[in-house]
Image (spheres, coloured by chain):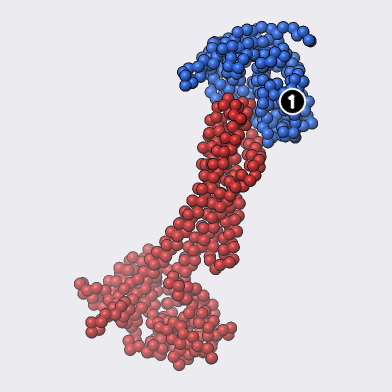
Amino acid sequence: MSEAVIRVVGLGKSYTTAAGLFPALKAVDLRVDAGEFVAIMGPSGSGKSTFMNLLGCLDTPTHGDYFLVGRNVAQLDKDQLAVLRNRTIGFVFQGFNLLPRMTLEDNVALPLVYAGVDRDSRRARARQELGRVGLADYASSLPSRISGGQQQRVAIARALINSPPLILADEPTGNLDSQTSEEIMTLFAGLNRQGITIVLVTHENDIAAHAQRQVRFRDGRIVSDQPTPARESA
Amino acid sequence: MRKAMLGEAWRAMGANRLRTVLTMLGMVIGVGSVVLMLAIGQGAQYAVAQTISTMGSNLYILISGSTSASGLRSGGGGGPTLTVADGEAISELDGVANVAPVHQGTQQLVYGANNWNTTVVGTTPNYLEARAWTLVSGYPFGDSDVRSATRVALIGQTAVDNLFGSDDPLGKTLRIRQSPFVVVGVLGRKGQNLDGRDQDDTVIIPLTTAQRKVFGTPFVGSVRLMMVQATSAEAMPLVEKSLTALLRQRHRIREDQENDFYLRNLAAAADSAAETTRVMSMLLGAIASVSLLVGGIGIMNIMLVSVTERTREIGIRMAIGARQRDILTQFLLEALMISVAGCLIGLLIGIGGALLTNALTDMVIVISGTAVLVAFGVAAAVGVFFGYYPAHRAAGLDPIEALRHQ
């Protein structure tokens, strides 16, 4: 059996607040294998954002272990985490998070700058990824010139450019209308079929229905973990 | 990667042009004023050095002491107690290059319809050598002229201008106190001395001629003034000691009596003048440096604002794999770029201002490569120094906090 993309053992995170130690996440166990499409759900304050930050190597746990593609992340320092994020994880955010002053091509190519790839290769690969999300014609536009749905496609192209095994999407359709959301989810499903592991946070059942597996959080714990029921409409 | 970062720094500068220009202005003014002030200061130093070099190097002026008659004491140079024989004895001393006894005073010169009051210097041929004074035309008089008290004259440029106008003075005859003198040489231009006196407003004639035919002194062969030149600056202390001993002996001064002469070290006077201008130019530079410092603080201020404004951008960059040193480099490069660009513009303005000052006034301006290089180095250092704190702050941001920043 191959190594899991994500393996989390007793993972927890506590914050120090004025009222004392607040456990945002309590001893979570989870395993996500290569090629899975997992939706993480739960009300706000359930700990799912904290969990996603830990999965994204943006934060370090207070206890437990996190193995990302076999590496124990808890032992890495900030710069090693940055390199790991760069090579292993593609981020897609709710607010798209493109850099407003850069062309779409430069936005998509930015992770390659930090990976130390030369200019010509950066450009070629950025164009290729833009083509993959259907926006090859907009390479030299600025993000403000295109729609929200298109911006999210560019963000997905950026997430894909370093060919990461894992994509983490945090409410990727939260700022989009339902039709555009549907298009973005179709895009994710297509990427998943190409073998990319996707973990997506959402609070909408419609969106979660695109995943194969749904994990629900409440009060810092996983309360349910089950395959998505067959869609009635599909 | 470095190239990509330079491109990004350039783009960030262009994103808010007015702000970038205003920030740069601090550096422009700072560097511009440093360059201009150093140019003026070094120009002043150069001008003083020029003046000093016209005096002649390693010079002493030997002045006869005060005399007293019926209780009235004269000042230094009161009586002609130095003799030509003293001068000859001094010239035998080790380390002495030239000795020139001088009898000078002002006299009215007449040439044709023109007349002009000027300083007449009666001396020996050594005088020209001691003062490093060259002729632009003609020949100097020699020792034989001094021995036979011939009526020959070397004439300075100012006297030439006022007496002869556009005529060539060489070979012409001018009159000093009714005595006719043939102009045998024209002196090169020396300009002002340290006291601001015009050194070219002069006529030099043989000492004997001056004493017998112009000034009519009863003490022929004695003078109030002598120029003594040492062979080198190192020889000066030795000359001072041996000259003093020699003169005390020749003038038969007892152990408990004071010298009847004064020895003035012109090199020391020159040094103090040079030191004064050096301090002045340093002061100018220091004042200008303050504006450079203010410019640097301006950069830090703007970079801090920029880091705050771009917190979210920093978060995004961190999420997609920027290491702390990548963020640090990015913001440091931006600060450096602003300060170096400001520095370049400031250099142009400073040099332009210096050239303009040179063109509009008669101030001497010296733009040295060192000053330009130092200004540039300081500007770069200011960029790094004042850019470091904001850049460090940016690099130290927590990616989650930064991403959440609106």
Q: What is the x, y in percent for residue B363?
A: 53, 66
Q: Is residue B400 visible?
A: yes
Q: Colour of chain B?
A: red
Question: In the depicted view, which residue is nearer to us: A36 or B55?
Answer: A36
Q: Give residue A180's quadrant in the image.
A: top right
State how many labels appear: 1
Question: In the depicted view, which residue is nearer to us: B233 or A199?
Answer: A199
Q: Give residue B176's quadrant in the image.
A: bottom left
Which chain letter goes with mark 1?
A
Q: Is residue B237 above or below residue B309?
A: below
The residue positioned 59% from the left and 20% from the top of the image is: A53
Which element carries disc 1, helix, strand or loop?
Answer: helix
- How crowded is the residue under tag 1: few (<14 C-alpha within 10 Å), some, or many (20+)? many
The residue positioned 45% from the left and 68% from the top of the image is: B52
Q: What is the x, y in percent for residue A199?
A: 66, 16
The residue positioned 59% from the left and 62% from the top of the image is: B355
The residue positioned 50% from the left and 48% from the top of the image is: B293
Q: Is residue B308 above or below residue B365?
A: above
Check disc 1 and give the amino acid type: Gly
Q: What is the x, y in percent for residue B322?
A: 60, 29
Q: What is the x, y in percent for residue B99?
A: 38, 75
Quadrant that contains the N terminus of chain B: top right
Is A234 on the left-hand or right-hand side of B11? right
Is B369 on the left-hand or right-hand side of A210? left
Question: In the depicted view, which residue is nearer to us: A104 or A2?
Answer: A104
Is A104 on the left-hand or right-hand side of B54? right
Q: Please give the letter of the chain rendered in blue.
A: A
Residue holding disc 1 = A149
